[in-house]
Image (cartoon, rainbow, N blue to C red):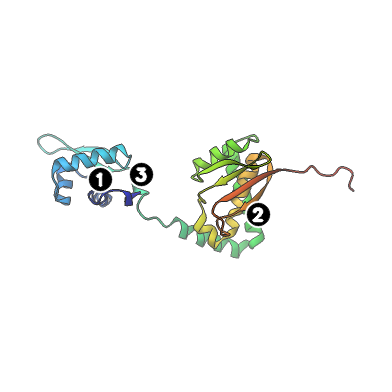
């Protein structure tokens, strides 16, 4: 997101990152070598975008100075290494419990995530709603015979799943638990697909005549 901002706004956010307690308009103007009017305009735009907020006021002996600081959302736009930590943890867990147990753990996590969102079986439209809240950019698509499939244009774990394909088990378990069905993963970005496609298949009841 920061890449979409102008150079001055990026410099302003970077200055606030280094001053967690906040900075005044005068301090920002001096730091960035621009006018106070320009700083006010940039702050107004960044406030509107949820990147900057007004913090405490600082006494000066005259009129108190308003301090500005970064929002938590803005801080998250700076580089993070969550993926590196997740990859190391997955490697460590796999070494401890083995690959089969790791796959079982991923499916369990997916089912728990589903339970956090719904306590009953829902349809594809509702599943897509939950997926989009997590950033999957998904939609329900009818390809043939009026059979719906879920198409996700963004794999939220893509880089992690490229190294650890077992992560896809979490997606499948999440979708399957929400839909109360088996999930067929017909196209996968990690396997070279352009999107991820999922089809829900009703779970076949056990054959009562067997045994």
Quarter of the figure with residue 60 = top left
- Is residue 41 left or right of 165 when viewed as pictured? left
In whole angstroms, how far apart are the C-alphas of marks 3 and 1?
Answer: 13 Å
- Mark toward the viewer: 3 or 1: 3
Label 1 packing within 10 angstroms: few (<14), some (14-19), many (20+): few
As rendered, which of 31 and 59 lies closer to the eye? 31
- Is residue 109 left or right of 66 when viewed as pictured? right
Label 2 packing within 10 angstroms: few (<14), some (14-19), many (20+): some
Image disc number at residue 72: 3
The x and y percentages for residue 184 are 67, 49
Image disc number at residue 104: 2
- Is residue 84 left or right of 171 when viewed as pictured? left
- Would you say the residues marked 3 and 2 are in contact, meaning their CB atoms lie under 8 Å apart? no
Image disc number at residue 55: none
The x and y percentages for residue 149 are 62, 43
> Nearer the N terminus, badge 3 or badge 1?
1
- Mark toward the viewer: 2 or 1: 2
Count of numbered marks: 3
> Nearer the N terminus, badge 3 or badge 2?
3
- Would you say the residues marked 2 and 1 are in contact, meaning their CB atoms lie under 8 Å apart? no
The x and y percentages for residue 205 are 79, 42
In whole angstroms, how far apart are the C-alphas of marks 2 and 1?
Answer: 45 Å
Q: Which residue is mark 1?
A: 21
As rendered, which of 211 and 105 lies closer to the eye? 211
As rendered, which of 74 and 151 lies closer to the eye? 151
The x and y percentages for residue 55 are 26, 38
Q: Considering the numbered disc 1 on the image, is that residue within a helix, a strand or a loop?
A: loop
Label 3 packing within 10 angstroms: few (<14), some (14-19), many (20+): few
Q: Residue at x 15, y 35 (%)?
A: 64
Q: Considering the numbered disc 2 on the image, is that residue within a helix, a strand or a loop?
A: helix
> Nearer the N terminus, badge 2 or badge 1?
1
């Amino acid at each position: 997101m920061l890449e979409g901002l102008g150079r001055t706004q990026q410099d302003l956010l970077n200055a606030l990152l280094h001053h967690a307690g906040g900075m005044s308009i005068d301090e920002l103007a001096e730091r960035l070598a621009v006018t106070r009017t320009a700083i006010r305009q940039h702050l107004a735009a960044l406030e509107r975008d949820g990147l900057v907020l007004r913090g405490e006021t600082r006494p000066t002996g005259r009129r108190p100075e308003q301090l500005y600081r970064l929002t938590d959302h803005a801080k998250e736009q700076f580089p993070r290494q969550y993926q590196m930590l997740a990859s190391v943890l997955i490697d460590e867990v796999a070494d401890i419990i083995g690959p089969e147990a790791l796959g079982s753990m991923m499916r369990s996590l997916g089912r728990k995530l589903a339970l956090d969102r719904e306590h009953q079986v829902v349809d594809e439209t509702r599943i897509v709603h939950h997926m989009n809240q997590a950033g999957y950019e998904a939609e329900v698509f009818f390809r043939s015979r009026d059979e719906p499939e879920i198409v996700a244009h963004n794999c939220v774990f893509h880089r992690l799943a490229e190294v650890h394909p077992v992560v896809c088990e979490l997606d499948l378990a999440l979708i399957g638990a929400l839909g109360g069905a088996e999930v067929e993963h017909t196209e996968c970005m990690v396997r070279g697909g352009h999107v991820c496609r999922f089809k829900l298949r009703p779970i076949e009841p056990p054959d009562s005549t067997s045994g």
